[in-house]
Amino acid sequence: MAHNHDHDPSHAHEHGHDTQSASEQAMLEQAQAKLRSLFAGMPHEVPLYLFASRDREDVFAKAARDVLAAIQKFTSKITVEEHDLLGEIAKKWNVEHSPTMLFDPDIYHIRWQGAPLGEEGRTLVEALTMMGYKTSRLSRESQEILAKIQSKRDIKLFVSSTCPYCPQQAVNALKAAVGKPDLVSLEIVDIQANPELAAKYAAKGVPMTFANDKLIAQGAQPEELFMLSLEKLEPQTYFIPETEATEITTDLVIVGGGPAGLTAGIYASRSGLQAVVVERNALGGQMALTPVVENYPGLTQVGGKTLVDIMVQHALEYVRIFPGEEVVDIQQQGLFVIQTSRRRFKTKAVLLATGASHKKLGIPGESRLSGRGVSYCSTCDGPLFKGKKVIQVGGGNSAVTEALHLKSIGVDVTLVHRRDTLRAQDYLAKNLFASEIPILWDTRVKEIRGEKSVEEVVLDNKKSQMTETLSVNGVFIAIGYEPAVELAVKIGVALTPDGYINKDDYHRTNVPGIYSAGDVEGGYKQIVTAAGQGAGAAMTIFEDLINPYWKRQNDTPVEKSS
Ligand SMILES: Cc1cc2nc3c(=O)[nH]c(=O)nc-3n(C[C@H](O)[C@H](O)[C@H](O)COP(=O)(O)OP(=O)(O)OC[C@H]3O[C@@H](n4cnc5c(N)ncnc54)[C@H](O)[C@@H]3O)c2cc1C
């Protein structure tokens, strides 16, 4: 039968023997011998089912048949049974598309829609040997992540024969399906062989990985990152290996993985210090709660979570990070001994970058509509409300400053204060009165209402006992901060009258060897200022560790280098 090779994918990589040089022939024979011995060593047989149409137009069906026939010439360990697409077996395994291959389907849930051509040849060999040797070859870290998966994961991986990155991702997926056959199933889909399914998932770039119909990765990933994405069912951008070490000695422990702590980690490590960052929750601090950041230089508009990923990836180039680990105690015994929820650190210096959180009103609607009209930061979100009506809640310095800021950028703002006098500094109060911003005195916000975003507030007047609703687009709340200072207080670090860490211009606290940076110091509470303070503190710590100011006779501040 004559073949048109231009349209036959099974011949895409075929060379004519007449044009094959002797050295190419030798290489081919070497590769075949290697493959033969690899298959010969397999302790288990791998039954493979092929469902492929006999339609001459179905070039992928023919190619799949040819590839499997070629493999069978190398080994008897792989048995191929071809079944009718309309037959009982196809029905039993729910196969409808030609060509489809099932690998040892009584044990594994691995199906391949397409023909293992071109780059995918590598994937096929990996799949067969993984099953033939009954080993997933997972790293210890990957095994640990996979062990955490307790419910079903149905992976759909879109690939193509010309994509050099696809085999890496396919092997990751195979390792998961072979390593956990009870819960993980895998469907490899060649986008050319099944364009309808690719279109359904909008899979235009390969490799593209879905699990339980959620996109978990675009492109190829390192193995551990793949397993993490599979576990979390969302794309992951970094993997931090866990360690069982119960004690770690270092130069600097940074408490807090927000922008201040992460930046300090980069600066400290780059200056030659051994530093670690310990974070009790997810990394990024308040940044991770920020839907969109529009005032971090260099990034016109960036999602808070994306900025966290960028910063964490950068920091991981330099500094060890321990997420999900809370610092619970600090003692000074020559070195500082830091007890976390998981281990002990011994360190020469400690940087407290523990941040702060906004005080909440604690009223109905506040949490639900946070980020949807409820905001704690006019500098951050004010521009989104230009020309719109909002209330600013509070009567202290922050609330008045924020109300003035909102007015100055063209927001229609009303101040709502629960007392009849402001607690703000005089000059701020004067500016507020001069600005003609309306003020609702003796008024509490009882409820914030709205379907998808803020629509109205319910206000209660203490004096008149009247309740009214006011239509607004936004509610800005500035009723104070709660700096995270429990640890600082425990180790004798002095606080300011406002409750923030009291430090000098170089971020030194009253306890030698203990420093602070970021929102926990008070002042401007922004990502860029926290990062700047983290950098400054790390530079001071480096200089102090090589020339401790507390041991010097004349305790003058260190000469700062630029
Ligand atoms: C909703 C929202 C929107 C914002 N929008 C913007 C914006 O658009 N632009 C902008 O510039 N700023 C914005 N900010 C402010 C900005 O996020 C903060 O100023 C900044 O994150 C402060 O950084 P930090 O590192 O000092 O503290 P944080 O970000 O608060 O990080 C401190 C970290 O320390 C950890 N920690 C505390 N105690 C311990 C302990 N004992 N052990 C281990 N870890 C500990 C905490 O879990 C936390 O992750 C916003 C804040 C919020 C809440």
Image: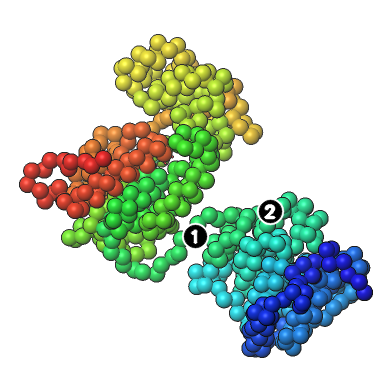
Residue annotated with mark 2: 205
C-alpha distance separating marks 2 and 1: 24 Å
Is residue 319 in view from this perspective?
yes
Quadrant into which the N terminus falls:
bottom right
Left/right of residue 362 with respect to residue 499 in the rendered view = right
Q: Quadrant of residue 137?
A: bottom right
Label annotation for residue 5: none
Left/right of residue 153 with respect to residue 438 in the rendered view = right
Residue annotated with mark 1: 239
Q: Quadrant of residue 269?
A: bottom left
Q: Position of residue 109 (x, y in %)?
A: 72, 72
Picture residue at 61% right of the left edge, 74% below the top: 179
Quadrant into which the C terminus falls:
top left
Of the residues under marks 2 and 1, which one precedes in the sequence? 2
Q: Secondary structure at mark 2?
A: loop
What's the residue type where badge 1 is placed? Phe
The one of 217 and 418 positioned closer to us in this rendering: 217
10 Å crowding of disc 1: few (<14), some (14-19), many (20+):
some
